């Protein structure tokens, strides 16, 4: 479990770094390009959340209540 969650976090952070560069590069952007990047960031976060949620333990869920 731990390795899969850490890998998912690493993938998410790598995606964020790449997408951040698209937002901060000194160049002209196309209409809607920023929105597309933001939506891709949200999709990456959602994939990470699904992975973490899928690997949660019953103990950690009940302990947080």
Image: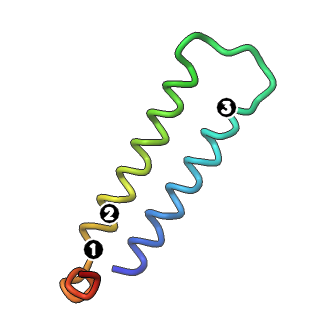
Image-quadrant location for residue 57: bottom left
For the residues marked 1 and 2, what is the alpha-carbon distance in whole angstroms? Answer: 6 Å
Q: Residue at x 61, y 11 (%)?
A: 30
Q: Earlier in the sequence, mark 2 or mark 3?
A: 3
Residue assigned mark 2? 51
Q: Callout 2 environment at 10 Å: few (<14), some (14 to 19), or many (20+)?
A: some
State the SS at label 2: helix
**In-image side of 36 versus 23 (left or right):** left
Residue assigned mark 1? 55
Q: Quadrant of the N terminus?
A: bottom left
User: Please, which residue is most extreme toward the front here?
Assistant: 65
Marker disc for residue 19: none
Residue assigned mark 3? 23
User: Please, which residue is most extreme toward the top here?
Assistant: 31
* Proximity of marks 1 and 2: CB atoms separated by less than 8 Å: yes
At which x and y percent is residue 10?
A: 54, 63
Q: Residue at x 36, y 50 (%)?
A: 46
At which x and y percent is residue 24?
A: 73, 33
At which x and y percent is residue 35?
A: 51, 24
**Nearer the observer, 48 or 11:** 48
Image-quadrant location for residue 26: top right
Q: Residue at x 43, y 47 (%)?
A: 44
């Amino acid at each position: 479990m731990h390795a899969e969650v850490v890998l998912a976090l690493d993938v998410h952070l790598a995606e964020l770094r790449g997408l951040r560069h698209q937002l901060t590069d000194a160049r002209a952007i196309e209409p809607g390009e920023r929105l597309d990047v933001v939506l891709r960031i949200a999709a990456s976060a959602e994939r990470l959340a699904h992975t973490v949620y899928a690997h949660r333990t019953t103990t950690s869920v009940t302990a947080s209540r």
